């Protein structure tokens, strides 16, 4: 299941994000969205977890959690329609 994580502190690293979600299960992929012009985080990213139950547990436990100084928002990522 692909999850969207918003309102991340711009100093948060992919390693920190991955470690946060690994508390709830296996993380298949983790990527922050980076601004091409500044090479800095845009404050959101995606985490993919192969097991739906673990992903749902991560959403329930991490949505609204304070990470650094920001309350992050976690939800299932919507499929992009081209």
Image (cartoon, rainbow, N blue to C red):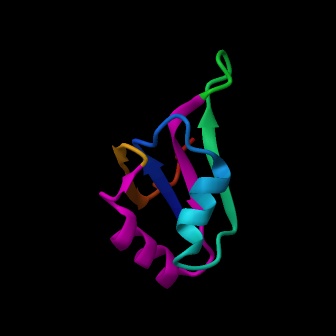
* Count of numbered tags: 0
From the top left corner, tell me how far across and down residue 81 is, in percent.
Answer: 52, 46
Q: Is residue 36 toward the left or the right of residue 80 in the image?
A: right
- Quarter of the view holding residue 48: bottom right
Question: Relative to residue 65, is residue 57 depicted above or below?
Answer: below
Q: Which residues are magenta?
A: 41-67
Q: Is residue 35 toward the left or the right of residue 44 in the image?
A: right
Question: Relative to residue 61, is residue 39 depicted above or below?
Answer: above
Question: Relative to residue 58, is residue 46 depicted above or below?
Answer: above
From the top left corner, tell me how far across and down residue 10 is, in percent.
Answer: 51, 34
From the top left corner, tell me how far across and down residue 80 is, in percent.
Answer: 53, 47
Look at 61% across and 64% down and name the residue there. 19
Nearer to me, 68 or 56: 68
Look at 69% across and 68% down and name the residue there. 28
Q: Is residue 1 at all visible to an observer of this figure?
A: no
Toward the front, the furthest residue is 68
Q: Is residue 49 at all visible to an observer of this figure?
A: yes
Look at 62% across and 25% down and name the residue there. 35
Q: Please state, as top left, top right, bottom left or bottom right, where the C terminus lies in the image.
A: top right
From the top left corner, tell me how far across and down residue 62 is, in percent.
Answer: 39, 65
Nearer to me, 80 or 73: 73
Q: Please state, as top left, top right, bottom left or bottom right, where the N terminus lies in the image.
A: bottom right
Q: Is residue 76 toward the left or the right of residue 21 in the image?
A: left
Question: Within the magenta stretch, is there residue 31?
Answer: no
Look at 52% across and 78% down and name the residue there. 24
């Amino acid at each position: 299941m692909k999850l969207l994580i918003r309102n991340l502190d711009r100093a948060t690293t992919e390693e920190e994000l991955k470690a946060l979600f690994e508390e709830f299960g296996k993380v298949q992929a983790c990527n922050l969205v980076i601004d091409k012009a500044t090479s800095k985080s845009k404050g959101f990213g995606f985490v993919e977890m192969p097991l739906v139950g673990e992903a749902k547990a991560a959403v329930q436990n991490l949505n609204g959690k304070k990470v650094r100084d920001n309350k992050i928002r976690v939800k299932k990522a919507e499929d992009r329609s081209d």
